[in-house]
Amino acid sequence: MIRKILAASIILLVGASLAGAQTAKVRKPVKKKPAIVKKIVKPVAPQIVKPQEPAAESVDEKLADLKEDTNKALAELKSSVDKVKSDNSDAKVSGVVFFRWQKYTQNSTTPNNFDVDRAYLDFKKKLAGNSAVRVTLDVRRLDSSLDANKKTQNLLDYLKYAYFETPVPIPSAVRLIPFDLTAKVGLQHTCWIDWADKMLNLRYISKSLVDNEGVMSSADFGLGAVGKVSLPGIPEIEYHGTLLNGTGYAKAEDDSKKYVGLRLNSTVYDGGEAGKVILGGFGHIAGINSSLSYNGSNKQVGAMLGYKHEIGTAYFEYLYGTGIAGNSLGGIVTALPGLNIFARLDQYDPNRSKASDQIDRTFYGVTYDWNKDIKLALDMQSATYGSAASSNAGKTVSAIYLHTMVTI
């Protein structure tokens, strides 16, 4: 009995051991939680940080700043200039200079010099209503006869033109013929000279006949009217009428008399490539008194016939008046591109009642268009005076010239 009890006890003990071992294999180990450690933070005393000094600016940085400032200033300047241009877009400033060298051929004691014949500064501005204003300054050497010491050296600047012009509307009900009218007030062109100068377009070499012989001034103070007349079946006619002091732009009015002039001109034939034929004429009464009497006044009439072609121009001018008569024949031909040959002959009698006082002038030479703004001319000019001429009687005076015209 005791043996059975001991055997059963041993079996139970072995079984319990085996079960405990199996249970130990299956159970997972349990991780222990880390212990929480409390850190004690000690307070840190505040530190005072001193501000750092800015680093010195480099040369490149200074140049960059300067460039930026300069560009800004230029932009502001351009803006101002553009505004001025916008405000004055209808204003025009131009000019021209006549420069020359001359050498008289008679002897070595006569002038051999360089000089400026004329210099013009021209200001034009359009106004409201298609009106316009023009102011032109002229510069030339003062005539020694006006100088008390007779040794004038300085060039004198003065007004050549200063006038206002405006279209005048003419109601069709009162117009017998179709025409337009522009009124001019102030110091302005006389009726003939400016138009005649444009025929050969060699003003920088010599004046036209009427101007060169002092028959009338090229500009004067007063009133003017310019326009065109359009009649069916005939070429358009341009007109230019003037009522002027008569003393010219260089002198003040010294009496009550006035000068009246009228020019009519037209392109009577336009053949395209065949060229154009231009005809013009003028009448001039010098010295109408306050009662409108002109019996004792000087009177002149003149005419010009011209032919213009792409290879050149030819013209004939005729002048006749109180005591005077004259004519001018001239032409210019293109020999090579930019190179032209010209010639002109003037015959003028300042007093038809006096014998042998006539003056014969010749002009000839070559011109060269350096570019659109510069023209050159090498020319010879001579004048033969009659035996009874007021100056240089019986003499021939000639000179060689180098003329230059520069357009500004």
Image (cartoon, rainbow, N blue to C red):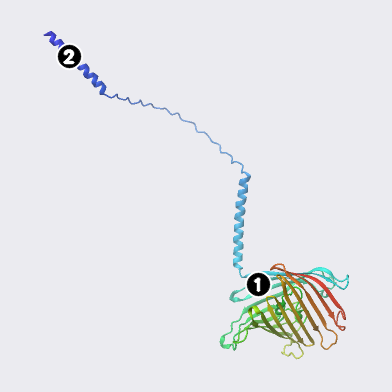
Task: Looking at the picture, tell me which residue is in the foreground, 372 or 55.
Answer: 372
Left-right relation of 92 to 9: right
Say if 404 sits above or below 2 in the image.
below
Q: Secondary structure at mark 2?
A: helix
Count of marks placed on residues: 2
- Measured as percent of width and height from the top left, residue 317 is found at 74, 83
Q: Amino acid at mark 1?
A: Lys
Vertical placement of residue 111 versus 265, above or below: above
Give the residue pinned by disc 2: 11
Q: Quadrant of the C terminus?
A: bottom right
Residue drawn at x 60%, y 61% is 80
**Tag 2: residue type?**
Ile
Residue 165 at x, y = what percent? Answer: 64, 78
Name the residue at 79% across, 86% down. 324
* Residue 28 at x, y percent in the picture: 28, 24
Q: Which mark is residue 124?
A: 1
